[in-house]
Image (tube, rainbow, N blue to C red):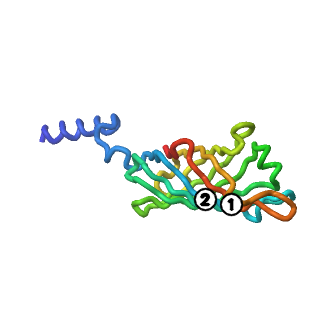
Amino acid sequence: MRSIARLAISVGLLIPMGIIAGPAGAAGGTSCKTSAGKATIIPGLSSAQTVQTIAATVTLSGCTGGGVSAGSGRATVKLGATDCTGLAKGGSKGALTETITWNTRRTSTFTGTTLSGTGAKVLQVAISGTVTVGLFKGSKVSTAFAYSVNAGQSCSKTSAITGLSIKGLKPFVIG
């Protein structure tokens, strides 16, 4: 009986110290080395200021931690009224919602903001947010990527930029 009591007390003391825990990184977060994708701008950037929505798909790979190794995401970014001049100027903010389906078939949905760079970094965007639903709920999200306008697209009164290619500049981190 004393042995059982000592064991119970020992276990009780170890739990708060984190010595008895689940698998390392089970739901603590993940970091994905690479990300790439494409985006469609609706209705498209032209010389006229218009409210824009960006629909993007992204592939995440080289993920470590949290029991995942890869994922694919679908994101929507809502921008205020902007035009090609705004794209060239940079510094624009957007409201982002993205759902990632991990290789384990579990999902994470996060909301956050995008902030485009300025000057020499005008074609770069920083993302920050929080997972609101699913795997990693409550964890912070951060990354940065570069984008380029798809070949053959230009900005004028009769033409709009509607397609972008996306490439990660930093790891996609949840944690």
Where does the N terminus fall, quadrant-wise?
Answer: top left
Residue 46 x %, y %: 82, 59
Quadrant in the picture for residue 83: bottom right
Residue 80 x %, y %: 79, 54
Q: Earlier in the sequence, mark 1 or mark 2?
A: 2
Q: Nearer the viewer, residue 131 or 88?
A: 88
Q: Nearer the viewer, residue 76 or 41?
A: 41
Residue at the spot of label 1: 163
Residue 87 versus residue 157 in the image, above or below: above
Name the residue located 76 percent from the left edge and 44 percent from the top edge. Answer: 90
* Left or right: 81, with 133 as reference point: right
Label 1 packing within 10 angstroms: few (<14), some (14-19), many (20+): many
Name the residue located 42 percent from the left edge and 49 percent from the top edge. Answer: 62
Check disc 1 and report its element: helix, strand or loop: strand
Q: Amino acid at mark 1?
A: Gly
Residue 59 x %, y %: 51, 57
Label at residue 152: none
Label 2 packing within 10 angstroms: few (<14), some (14-19), many (20+): some
* Left or right: 76, with 108 as reference point: right
Q: Amino acid at mark 2?
A: Lys
Calculate the distance from the C-alpha at mark 1 to the C-alpha at mark 2: 7 Å
Residue at the spot of label 2: 38
* Left or right: 48, with 108 as reference point: right
Callouts 1 and 2 close, C-beta under 8 Å: yes
